[in-house]
Amino acid sequence: MYSTDVVKDNFYITASKSGLESSEIAALKRSIPERVNLKQLKKDESIRLVVGKKSGKSRIVAYKLSSGKSEYTAYRISDSAFYKFDDNIAQANLAYPKPASARLSSSFNPSRVNPVSGRLSPHNGIDYSMPMKTRVVSVIGGTVTKAEYNKTMGYYVEVSGKAGVKTRYLHLNKILVKKGQQVKSGANIALSGNSGRSSGPHLHYELLINDKPVNSLAFRPQKAGLSKLEQHAWTHMQEYEQYLD
Ligand SMILES: [Zn+2]
């Protein structure tokens, strides 16, 4: 599998140079909005193709279309049709991929009260109890914006991604990334621990949207509600994603 460079100007010329047959180009054309003129892409338009081989033939398996401020990604889920995912974060899986050895030990609770002081003490994330030094992965792709120690949060990492989405990983044993580093979703960023204000080995995972803490479990795709085609698309998305960024 490979991805083409972002296609500009005349899409057809680039596509046929990449060895795509006309039926492939036609399938793509059907899935693209009519306002996009493939013969002459505008300055602020671009398409990135992910091409795979199937029985010797080149096949478009995914593409990302950018047009001005809007952008969407489409995945091939049958020989003819593409399934589109727009930038709607509600469709993204922003829940932490809990390892089998972990359990959810404390939920998101913005109105938690400290039983001793009686004061409001919001729990802005989800706690997963897990053995010391369990690998911690980044939920989103993006830039490491914090990788440091704090008296309360302990060793912690913050990864900032697209659309105002930030994720934080607290009480770590060891940080494996540096500030400013780019990470992909699923990348190892740390080992879990018990640093800072923590009463036992666990990972505190925080999801912020436009700097507001939100319940990450609400951003778990509702797998049961997905159609067969959508399920299929989800399983392929992870695989194709690395070629699209
Ligand atoms: Zn916590």
Image (cartoon, rainbow, N blue to C red):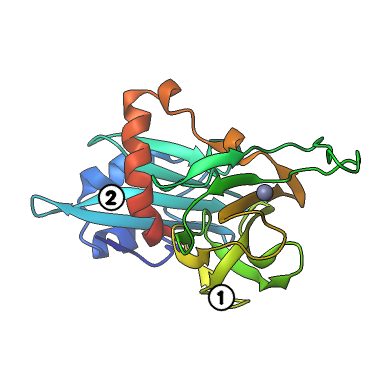
Q: Give whichever of discs 2 and 1 has the lower sequence position.
A: 2
Task: Write down the residue under mark 2.
Answer: 60
Quarter where residue 109 is shown: top right
* Image coordinates for residue 217, horizontal then vertical, percent: 58, 36
In this picture, residue 50 sits left or right of residue 216: left
Tag 2 secondary structure: strand
Amino acid type at circle 2 is: Ile
* Image coordinates for residue 101, horizontal then vertical, percent: 40, 47
* Image coordinates for residue 227, horizontal then vertical, percent: 37, 23
Let me know if residue 30 appears in the view.
Answer: no
Amino acid type at circle 1 is: Gln
The residue under the point 53% across, 53% down is: 66
User: Distance from label 2 to label 1 (Cα)?
Assistant: 31 Å
The residue under the point 49% across, 41% down is: 103
Q: Is residue 84 above or below residue 188?
A: above
Q: Is residue 8 above or below residue 102?
A: below
Task: Write down the residue under mark 1.
Answer: 181
Quarter where residue 7 is shown: bottom left
Residues at badges 2 and 1 in contact (C-beta under 8 Å)? no
Tag 1 secondary structure: loop
